Image: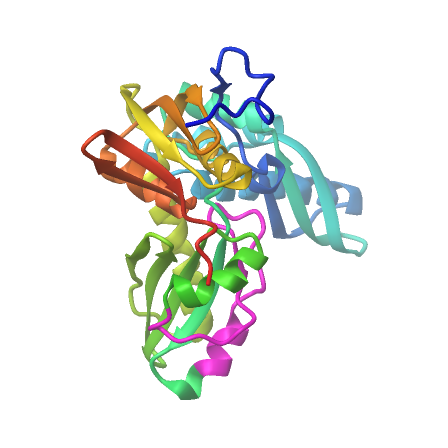
Amino acid sequence: MKLFSILFGAIATLTVSVGPAFADTRAVYTISGIQVDKTASTTQEAELNAIAAAKIIGLQALVQKLTLPEDRENIPAEFYGFDNANRLATAYDVQDEKRTTLLYRAKLDVLYNPSAVRSALRGLNIPFIDQQAPLSMMVPVVTNPLLTDEWRNAWPQSNDGALNPYVKALSFYTASDSWETLSSEANSVMAKNAVLAELSGEAGAYRVRLVRETAGGATTIGVTAPVATIEDAVRASSVYLDVAWKRQSVIRSTERTRSKATVRFADLASWNSIRSALSASALVSEFQVDALSSDGALVSFAYAGTEDRLLTELRQRGVKLEKDEAGWVMTSALRLTP
């Protein structure tokens, strides 16, 4: 391999350390659309009570977003009290405000302090994840063609701030479409994978089968429990994806496995996409470039959890990690478009 002396001449030691990267923390730590309705002896008192209630409701929603059910059980009730909620909240924005003599009604967005919330949860030994999954392209598909439009229209165009963010596909696809078909539109919206959300059943018993498509192949995420309406099916799908991401990403142990890999790439964009994926992963730490050339690199890193978790995580971020006779080999899958 020829040395990449022109593009990387400034890297004298060929060693780069990349620390963990946090996603859009403001979006993650903002709870939007909190409805409050309070009455009191004065409008001012009702407003203060409503804002206090919004901070408490928002904190409960934030903890639910960041943690798994079995871990939330260990959080004491006083954590959600006003004093703590007020301490952790850093700002709020009022929407749709209505006042009368004794009533205050509004919709609020509350932003919480990321550092303070992390510290509070760690102080209670509560595992959490506040890094967003890589952006997906959401592809609503159906088993009953008569439900195509209703199912597609039920999905928002995007869900900024969710742990598992997506952008809804504009084109029509089927459940049999693979990454080869989906990748062109997915890449155009900067999505590193696509999620096929296949609706089946009928009113009162809708289910959704969720399958993730990447250049590395298809992975079944799971099937939601039956729900009554199509709107409920959208919500159930979003919750399922968020929980799946948390189970994949939450780290419960300080133990790390040290590893090395050969990286193969065709161009600078592919190399940068691999580095970005590794630095963004909650499972990967101590990532270093030990040697670099015009078409490859030798890297070392540590990772939490099992090999399967690491493979799934990187595949979702557009990186293929495979083993050959020489050990781990990494390649970018993002540029494998038709």
Report the residue at 67% width, 41% height from top.
51
Q: In which quarter of the image is residue 307?
A: top left
Q: Position of residue 147 (x, y in %)?
A: 43, 83
Drawn side of residue 330 relative to residue 95, left or right: left
Figure check: 84 above or below 107? above
The furthest residue to the top: 13
Q: Verify whether residue 276 appears in magenta.
A: no
Q: Quadrant of residue 214?
A: bottom left
Nearer to the camera, 73 or 53: 73
Report the residue at 73% width, 44% height from top.
93
The furthest residue to the front: 2
Q: Verify whether residue 176 appears in magenta.
A: yes
Q: Quadrant of residue 207?
A: bottom left
**Secondary structure of the magenta portion, mostly?**
loop
Report the residue at 39% width, 53% height from top.
241
Drawn side of residue 256 relative to residue 135, left or right: left
Figure check: 69 above or below 290? below
Write the start and end of the magenta stretch as one range.
148-177
Nearer to the camera, 164 or 184: 184
The furthest residue to the bottom: 146
| Count of numbered circles on the image | 0
Drawn side of residue 176 relative to residue 37, left or right: left
Q: Where is residue 74 in the image (x, y as percent from the top left)?
A: 33, 31
Q: Can residue 7 be seen in this view?
A: yes
